[in-house]
Image: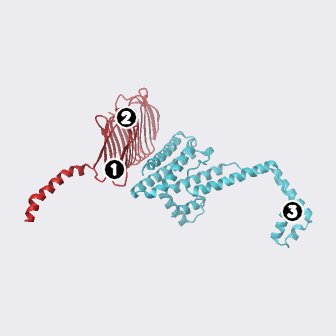
Chain colours: A cyan, B red
Amino acid sequence: MDCRIVRNSLSNYLDGLLPGHEVKLIENHLGECPGCQVVKLDLSEIRIAARELPLHTPPRALWVRIQQSIEAELAADGVGGRQAGKSQSGLARWWADLKSRQFTFSLPQLAGAGVLSVLLVGAIFFGAYRQDGVTTGPALTQASTALIPEEPRMLERIRFLTGTLDQRKASWDPTIQKLYEGKLTRINQKLEECKQKLREQPGNKEHEQMVRDLYNEEIEHLELFDKIR
Amino acid sequence: MKRILWEKKLLPGVALMGLLTLPALAQGYNKSFRVPADGGSLEVVHKIGSVSVNVAEGSTVTVTARQSDARISATQSSQGKVRIVVEGNAAIDLVINAPTGTALDLSCIKGEVTVRNMSGPIRVRNTEGDILLSGIRSTRVDVGSSDGNVSFSGDVLPGGSYSLKSFSGHVSAILPASADFRLIASSNQGGIDVSSFGMSLNKQTDKQVEGTRGEGRATVTLWTQQGTIHLKRR
């Protein structure tokens, strides 16, 4: 199965939206492809981080203003305006309404919209960045949700090395490739187990050390294969 | 007539030439470098095959391989560092003789790595294959194998740091009874046996043991995910 297809389906896979046969195909691929496995782990972490973000409720005044402007429009059109509107072309009426409408925003609303736009563009950029398999950028791993303090730095190093080796491994002898991928898969499986334990018991020093050791093990494994030509 | 000439003159000649060239073919690869008196440093990057490092008298590093088709790039930098890189994918067994104080940095993908009687800093990384260190008298030892066993036998010097790791293999260290060190041993699944060394334990769970022997003047770290850990007294 092609890495690009797998990576495009990972979100649905993690949401449990894929049919059984596709799940099997993706799991088979993940078992053999360390690169996709890293993407899957990253995506899982982003989902967990997103779940932990606080919910922002718009201020009540905003809804009041919207309600007032709707009522004002209805009053201008006459009480039966909405009913009469149904007889017009829906699109034409919507466009006419839009043209005649005046939008006003307060400064905090504009600032909020700006921040939201930046986050949205950042998320789209990051998604495209990951799908291309380019891994040399700054670790956008949510530092605030890192399981251990060194995790963002370690992930950045792993992404960089994995990106480099993904391009080179095609030229390796099959025996070498098998050793590289087999070991990487096993480390990642073990790492995921230990991270899960740490999530269940946050602050547990023993689990923290295991996670740290396994990240180091993965980095050393990648660095060893980075040396060979 | 021609047959007699062949049998009596040419055949012995051919046989003699064969005998003379045989040792050269059997020897395979052989290269030497002059290094600083303290041994300098040596880096090996190897894919498949064993690496064996032994002590050499004098100040020469010698690299030999039995395989005649060995594709080995052995170079020396202007600072005296020797770098050996095995190219291609053939299995090559390297035998290296170096002054005892040489700093070693050995990387091997698949094959056993053996280091004997060396006293300089030692760093070894291996994916599949055992790492065996014996007669070591160094203050810096940092070795790790993914799928092989790791064993160390040697002295523990004050201020020294000894890190022995394996992902799925066993880790064992045989240290002198007089060794003075702080121990950090961690095995996720295999079990830890440090009973032959009397030490004051700061922590002991089924996965981790931390303790001190003497004043704890050196640090010994033993780590494995799936193998066992054995600390023994010499």
Kindly indicate whether the residue at mark 3 contacts the one at mark 2 (C-beta within 8 angstroms). no
Which amino acid is tagged 1? Gly
Q: Quadrant of the C terminus of chain B?
A: top left
Which amino acid is tagged 3? Ser
**Residue drawn at x 64%, y 55% as measured from the top left:** A125
Q: Residues within 10 Å of mark 3 (few under 14, many from 20)?
A: few
Residue A92, quarter of the rendered image? bottom right
Q: Quadrant of the N terminus of chain B?
A: bottom left
Q: Which residue is mark 3?
A: A100
Q: Which mark is residue B67?
A: none
Q: Residue furthest top?
A: B215
In the rendered structure, the residue with mark 3 lies on which chain?
A
Q: Residues within 10 Å of mark 2 (few under 14, many from 20)?
A: many
Could you say whether the residue bearing mark 3 is in a helix, strand or loop?
helix
Q: Is residue A8 left or right of residue B141?
A: right
Q: Earlier in the sequence, mark 1 or mark 2?
A: 1
Q: Is residue A86 above or below residue B7?
A: below
Q: Same chain for labels 2 and 3? Say yes or no.
A: no
Query: CA–CA distance between discs 1 and 2?
Result: 24 Å
Residue A6, quarter of the rendered image? bottom right
Q: Which residue is mark 2?
A: B120
Q: Is residue B1 above or below residue B22?
A: below
Kindly indicate whether the residue at mark 3 contacts the one at mark 1 (C-beta within 8 angstroms). no
Seen from the viewer's position, the closer of residues B149 and A17 is B149
Could you say whether the residue bearing mark 1 is in a helix, strand or loop?
loop
Could you say whether the residue bearing mark 2 is in a helix, strand or loop?
loop
Q: Which mark is residue B49?
A: 1
Location of residue B207 in the rendering, given as x and y in whole percent from the top left corner: 46, 41
Which amino acid is tagged 2? Gly
Location of residue B116 in the rendering, given as x and y in whole percent from the top left corner: 31, 38
